[in-house]
Image (spheres, rainbow, N blue to C red):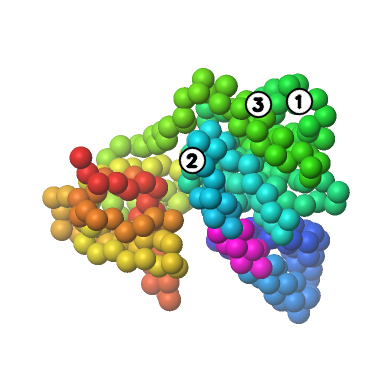
Amino acid sequence: DLGFSVAPRLNAAGRLSDISRGIKCLLTDDMNDARRYAQELEAFNQKRRTEQERIQLEAEAIVKAQEVSESKFALSLFDPSWHEGIVGIVAGKLKEMHHCPCAVFAKSGDSLKGSIRSIPSVHIKDLLDLVDRQNPGLILKFGGHAMAAGLSIKPENFWHFKRAFSKAIKQHLDAKIPTVELLTDGELEAFDISLDNAQLLADSGPWGQGFEEPIFYGNFEIVEQKVVGEKHLKCRLKLMGDTHIHDAIAFFQAPLDTKQVTVAYKLSINTWRGATNLQLMVEQISASE
């Protein structure tokens, strides 16, 4: 609950305004003040969600309008209306969807402030070092680590950076388009796909970089599927050879034309209107071979 309910609301205040409201909410001894601060944090989080969805949709539209060759190795995107506190989240989503390093920029005073999210085969801090050496003065300042970085550039240098960034990544990868590599923890027997095991895994967290949440895979039959929220796929899956039907959700996934699918998934807990059930969080789904 702290990780999925409280933390995003505290984080939203820092992204859109400042973190002081969150600190005051945690430290106050007055219940009325606590409620007021909590309501403000909730408003920030709702605004963050709305802005994130808008920016992501606009970013996807830009990607679709680009030539395919432009987005094979890297994405660099900018719009003057995007919020600098949200572009990092969007960069992470785009990186997952397109499987390449993604840089997303927003206006910040007289400069552009960018957030980059990378893939395992590209150490993004080292790559920015290379871009900086090859293009003196292009990057005003930058910092980061293997998988994420932040930087500032002049607005008039955006297209220069876009070309230099993509060129450096292409050279680093020896012109080989990045491939998706999803490591799993193997198949689960039918009786192991359970709410009890989902709770056991939840209690074993928190999960994160270097301590990844387990991902399993299996061959399933799609019993039912429907699109929710205009872009996510909610389905009911049955493990081949079993009779139990499991609820599952696949974000940013279109409906499939086949019944037999191979699914990489996480065991998760879905609580809705007082009822707690097992839900499979789909990481990858494709027609079975």
For residue 235, above or below residue 153:
below
Q: Position of residue 159 (x, y in %)?
A: 70, 39
Q: CA distance from mark 3 to mark 2?
A: 22 Å
Asked if the magenta segment contains residue 108, the reply would be: no
Which badge, 1 or 3, comes first in the chain's sequence? 3
Which badge, 1 or 2, comes first in the chain's sequence? 2
What is the secondary structure assignment of the residue under circle 1? loop
Residue type highlighted by circle 3: Leu
Using the image as rendered, state which of residue 32 and residue 8 is in the foreground: 8
- Reading the image, the residue beneath label 1 is 135
Residue type highlighted by circle 2: Val
Asked if the magenta segment contains residue 51, the reply would be: yes
Q: CA distance from mark 1 to mark 3?
A: 12 Å
Q: What residue is rendered at 47% in x and 25% in y?
A: 176
Residue type highlighted by circle 1: Asn
Residue 85 picture quarter: bottom right
Main secondary-structure element of the magenta-colored stretch:
helix
Asked if the residue under mark 2 is in contact with the one under mark 3, i.e. CB atoms within 8 Å, the reply is no
- Reading the image, the residue beneath label 2 is 68
For the residue carrying disc 2, how many other residues have a C-alpha within 10 Å: few (<14), some (14-19), or many (20+)?
Answer: few
- Is residue 15 visible from the viewing direction of this image? no
- Reading the image, the residue beneath label 3 is 127
The answer to whether 283 appears left or right of 224 in the picture is right
